[in-house]
Image (tube, grey):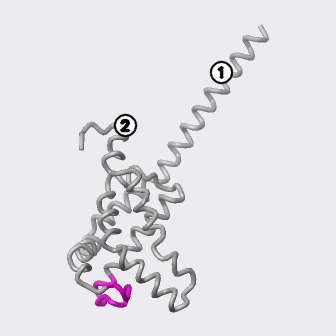
Amino acid sequence: MEIAALVVSLLALAVSGVVSLRQLRLSQHANALPVVVDLFQEHRGVRLAQARTFVHEELPGYDLDGGLAGLPDEGRDLVRELAWYYDNLGVLVAHGVVDIEPVSGYLGGSVISVWEHMEPLVRAERTRRAQNTLPDPGRWQVYFENLYHLVRETPAEQARAQAPLWRLSD
């Protein structure tokens, strides 16, 4: 009788633990959902679309050795906004607020192509900041750079294929 009570107690404890973990995961998703929706909506917005167009079509035509200072005012503003967007997104991913899979599945191609176009500018800007003795110059856009590497490790196709309800083949 005591063994049966012990088994039932252990089983109840195990079920309680599983339910608690599931509840914790659902709670984390519920907290992250508004953030993810807002971020995806902002990415689709006119301003960031203009910024992506500038980065892909016009940025390669500029001498990037001077960092942001080598860009015209409007281009500099667009590049900053886009870089800060991805840097902020990278913060949320790196600190576990948002999972990499939906970010990579939805924005992965954009993260990769924008970083690859902007990397020379970012490196030059870090150098410029170091020469101006700005604090922590190597950290500028480090979360964006990290996000790029995370997306490369979990490509969009893989992220989508791992989604429980994904049925299309890429």
Residue at point 57% right, 84% down? 135
Q: Would you say 83 lies left or right of 96 here?
A: left
Circle 1: residue type: Leu
Which residue sits at x=34%, y=74%?
118
Query: Of residues 21 and 122, which is closer to you in this image?
Result: 122
Task: Give residue 129's position: percent from left, percent from top.
Answer: 49, 86
**Where in the figure is residue 42, as x and y percent of width and height?**
33, 66
Question: Are there few (<14), some (14-19), or many (20+) residues within 10 Å of tag 2?
Answer: few
User: Which residue occupies the foreground of this view, 5 or 55?
Assistant: 55
Residue highlighted by disc 2: 164
Q: Is residue 66 magenta?
A: yes
Is residue 23 on the magenta stretch? no
Which residue is found at the position 38% from the left and 62% from the top? Answer: 39
**Quadrant of image for the C terminus:** top left
Q: Residue furthest left?
A: 57
In the displayed image of the protein, which residue is found farthest to the right? 2
Identify which amino acid the numbered label 2 is placed on.
Pro
| Cα distance between the residues tagged 1 and 2 | 28 Å
Residue 138, relative to residue 22: is it above or below? below
Find disc 1 in the rendering and name its residue.
Answer: 11
Q: Is residue 26 left or right of residue 40?
A: right
| Coordinates of residue 138 in the picture (x, y in percent) | 51, 77
Task: Decide which of tag 1 and tag 2 comes sooner along the chain.
Answer: 1
Range of the magenta residues?
Answer: 64-77
Identify the mark at residue 146; answer none if there is no mark. none
